[in-house]
Image (cartoon, rainbow, N blue to C red):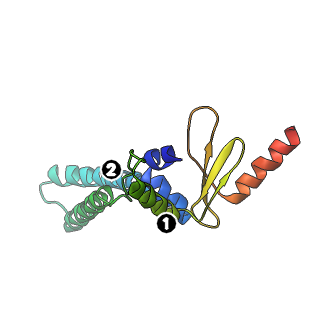
Amino acid sequence: MLWVFQNIDPTAFAAAQSGSRDDTADRIAEAEHQIQSIGRQVQKLTALIINDDAPSPSLVTALKAQEAQLLTAESCLEALKVQKKPELPPVPDDLTVPAVRRALRKEIARWCSKVEIFADHFVFWLTVKYGIKVPLEGEPAAIYHAPEQFAAEAAEAAAVA
């Protein structure tokens, strides 16, 4: 059980706890794509203006607007990159001290609504709907599931047996 709380990804833990997926990486990729697109537009407009002795005022205005959009998109990207990631409190290794064990039990009780132990895995229920399934066989790994997925897996295992 201690392995889970020492090795769990804080972002995945927060997503499992809230039942929502962290889409920060998707938003960063979208912002980078938008910056590339705007950058190409700025380059095109700049090329048109540089090669023209008397550039059209509308081209100059369009270039200024695109440059402003580029600055806004770059600042949004920077804000996304520095967005604070959720953190878990440190888990002590020395559980021989009773006060440390009590503190760890208190943290687990704060994180989990219940813990279910089965023959081949156990589940930390973070909320009524979302939990972390940890297999006991093979390489330890935390799998984030909702109860419907657990029920489907149980039905599938029963059908095989």
Q: Is residue 56 above or below residue 25?
A: below
Residue 143 rendering spot, x and y as whole percentages? 59, 47
Q: Kindly identify the residue that appears in the image at 20 percent across and 53 percent down.
A: 46
| Marker disc for residue 155 | none
Q: Nearer the viewer, mark 1 or mark 2?
A: 1
* Tags 1 and 2 touching, CB below 8 Å: no
Q: Residues within 10 Å of mark 1 (few under 14, many from 20)?
A: few
Q: Is residue 71 left or right of residue 121?
A: left
State the residue in front, 52 or 158: 158
Q: Which secondary structure lies at badge 1?
A: helix
Residue 134 rendering spot, x and y as whole percentages? 60, 45
Q: CA distance from mark 1 to mark 2?
A: 44 Å
Q: Is residue 62 left or right of residue 22?
A: left
Q: Which residue lies most toward the left here?
A: 53
State the residue in front, 61 or 34: 34
Residue 75 rendering spot, x and y as whole percentages? 25, 62
Q: Kindly identify the residue that appears in the image at 49 percent across and 53 percent down.
A: 12
Q: Kindly identify the residue that appears in the image at 44 percent across and 55 percent down.
A: 101
Q: Residues within 10 Å of mark 2 (few under 14, many from 20)?
A: some
| Marker disc for residue 36 | 2
Residue 71 rendering spot, x and y as whole percentages? 23, 61
Q: Kindly identify the residue that appears in the image at 87 percent across and 38 percent down.
A: 161
Amino acid type shown at disc 1: Arg
Amino acid type shown at disc 2: Gln
| Marker disc for residue 110 | 1
Q: Which secondary structure lies at badge 2?
A: helix
- Asked if residue 159 shows in the view, the reply is yes
- Asked if residue 22 shows in the view, the reply is no
Q: Earlier in the sequence, mark 1 or mark 2?
A: 2
Rendering quarter of residue 34 = bottom left
State the residue in front, 50 or 127: 127
